[in-house]
Image: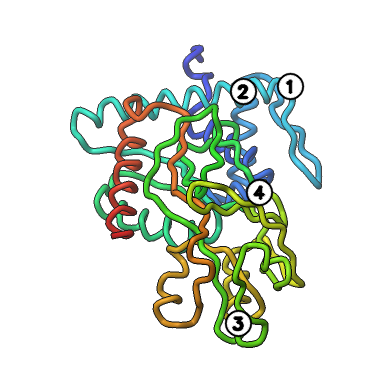
Amino acid sequence: MNTIRDQLPLPEDLRVFLTVIRKQSFAGAADELGLSPAYVSKRIQILEGALKTKVLHRTTRRIALTEDGERAQRWAVRILGDLDDLFDELSQARQTPRGLIHICTSFGFGRNHVAPAISSMAEHYPELEVRLEVFDRVVDIVGEGFDLEIRVGDDLPGQHISKRLVSNTRVLCASPDYLARRGTPESIDDLQRHDCLVLKERNNAFGVWHIDRNGKTYSARVSGPLSSNNGEIVLQWALSGRGILLRSMWDVRPLLEQGKLVQLLHDYSQSADVWAVYPTRLSNSAKLRVCVEFLADYFKHLSE
């Protein structure tokens, strides 16, 4: 005889369900979870059978939540969060964080800096499972199921908690070849007469650089024949002499030391501090607290 408990969804089914929503495909969810698409489909069928309702509209082109599916999504996030909190509470007593922590950040910073930091953290905390995703857009960390976002720049969401991990600045620079060909700008207004390599990231204004000098912010409208939404591409263009860029000192310091780039207008810079952004207090989650503290210590030593 089946009991009500036998008919309740398993945590595995809820995790599969949330992954399908986030990836917007059964194949994408299967790939991320290391399962077959057929197994993912089966878990969704089991979930719908347990809930006695359809949670997804499935067509050949897209997947959409039903009205009941939206309710199920909210409960799934809450239930799995409570399970993680249970492990966190028990692990706090052992001082050994464990479980899954879902982190997002931007492409270039994620590949060059966050990924090595997480690799080091995994060595220190082997029971912690980290899933890192990178984007070139604004992320709704709660709606998309993230525990933590590592963000560069001071445009921070007011609805979440933010902790500065390390101070950082962006500086103006160009290659010696470009400066020999086009001359060196002597003032911020001179940028309008130069080819500037414009980077479009997230929701930042396109073609406008807000740069600080002695506590005052100046807005420089810049343009050039080349622009991209990827910082590493823009950096490569600068190295090949295609124009002036505004780039994080973390990324260009070795290139400046090697003479491959030259810093311009030394009095001007743009704040680009590195922040941890999260929706819940660190005291409520052992794994989140350990992750933020580790990253703060890692980036601090990296910048020294």
Q: CA distance from mark 2 to mark 1?
A: 9 Å
How far apart marks 4 and 2 lie (CA) works out to: 34 Å
Task: Judge left or right: residue 48 versus residue 91.
Answer: right
Closer to us: 133 or 157:
157
Query: Which mark is drawn over residue 204?
Result: 4
Residue 304: which quarter of the image?
bottom left
Q: Quadrant of residue 221?
A: bottom right
Residues at marks 3 and 4 touching, judged by CB atoms closer than 8 Å = no
Q: Are marks 3 and 1 in contact (CB under 8 Å)?
A: no
Rounded to the nearest whole Å, what is the CA distance between mark 3 and mark 4?
27 Å
Disc 4 on helix, strand or loop? loop
Residue 44 in the figure: left or right of residue 297: right
Q: Which mark is residue 179?
A: 3
Q: Residue furthest left?
A: 94
Q: Which mark is residue 72?
A: 2
Residue type, label 3: Leu
Q: Nearer the viewer, residue 112 or 219?
A: 219
Dot 2 lies on which element?
A: helix
Q: Which residue is mark 1?
A: 67
